[in-house]
Image (cartoon, helix red, strand yellow):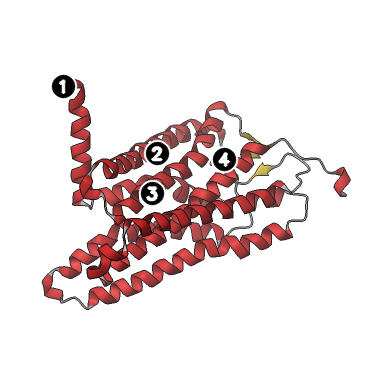
Amino acid sequence: MGQGNQSTVSEFLLRGISHWPEHEQILFGLFLFMYLVIMVGNLLIFLAIIFEARLHTPMYFFLACLSLADIGLSSTTVLKMLVNMYTQCHTISYIGCLTQLYFFLTFGDLDSFLLAVMAYDRYVAICHPLHYTRAMNPKLCILLVSVCWVLTNLVALTHTLLMAHLSFCMIGEVSQFFCDIGPLLKLSCSDTHINELMVFAVGGPVMTIPFLCIVASYIHIVLAILRIPSGSGGRRKAFSTCGSHLSVVCVFYGTVLSAYFCPSSVYSTEEAASSVVYTVVTPMLNPFLYSLRNRDMKAALKKMVSKRTLVPWK
């Protein structure tokens, strides 16, 4: 089809989670509950870190940033899905789709970068404890988060602008419950070679480089922990400081790698489940993983909740 015969569509159809409409009421209630848990849990983590002076350390600063990124990632994808389920209208406008794509890439990649920064923080704390305060100073922490934010926005903007230059000749069904690069490229009637090249040249390193940094950090951490005398109790304490972060890394990268590096030729239940895990389940579990096993975080949350509860009675 020639370029002159192409017309840009004004909206897309989103596949959704289930193929059976009778399941949507149950799924709507389930995902609404999960979204509320994500919002409340991550906001509590963020506010506890802000208002509790004992938590004003690099590790909790990065955790607060991760909580905000999780809120942004889930809000970008889940809110539109909930609206579509409620209205029984699974369409999204062309502009809305590109906007969702931009913010999804921004917050999704930001999660990956922040997990790598948190791994580096644990590496410095365990492998170089005497230099930790000087090495992880506030200026460096702010610089690391700022670099992560700038890089993820540039990557997301690049992919979004390239997608905006493509033509879509007919209203097609996006084989996801949100607008993602792969499903949109399949609907385009333009030449997508540049877009696909950028996915491998930019999108691949954005996920693999932070993952490799995390692996390298934990190799040094494990080696440093093994040098600690087994009877001193230091090993258990060192492992406990990394357990929550390592759990989140395994869940996040496990589902992302299965969804993007081992994709199926057609939209499958497994692909949908992987997308749900890293956009919904992982942000929902993060507050629990980081608070239930952390004494300082639990104390800060109890203190904050008790203060807010007593305020109306004063």
Quadrant (top left/top right/bottom left/bottom right) for the C terminus? top left
Residue under the point 76% across and 46% down: 167
| Label located before the other in sequence (3 or 1) | 3
Relative image position of residue 32 (x, y in whole percent): 43, 34
Q: Which mark is residue 314?
A: 1
Relative to residue 210, is residue 296 drawn left or right? Answer: left
Relative to residue 243, is residue 199 drawn left or right? Answer: right
Residue under the point 83% across and 43% down: 6
Q: Label 2 belongs to which residue? A: 34
Relative image position of residue 130 (x, y in whole percent): 22, 69
Q: Within the image, what quadrant is residue 119 found in?
A: bottom left
Residue under the point 19% across and 39% down: 302
Q: Which mark is residue 16?
A: 4
Residue closer to the observer: 267 or 248:
248
Element type at mark 1 = loop
Q: CA distance from mark 3 to mark 1?
A: 33 Å
Q: Label 3 belongs to which residue? A: 65
Furthest residue in direction left, as rendered = 231
- Mark closer to the observer (3, 2): 3
CB-based contact (under 8 Å), mark 3 and mark 1: no
Residue under the point 26% across and 75% down: 224
Q: Which mark is residue 210?
A: none
Element type at mark 4 = loop
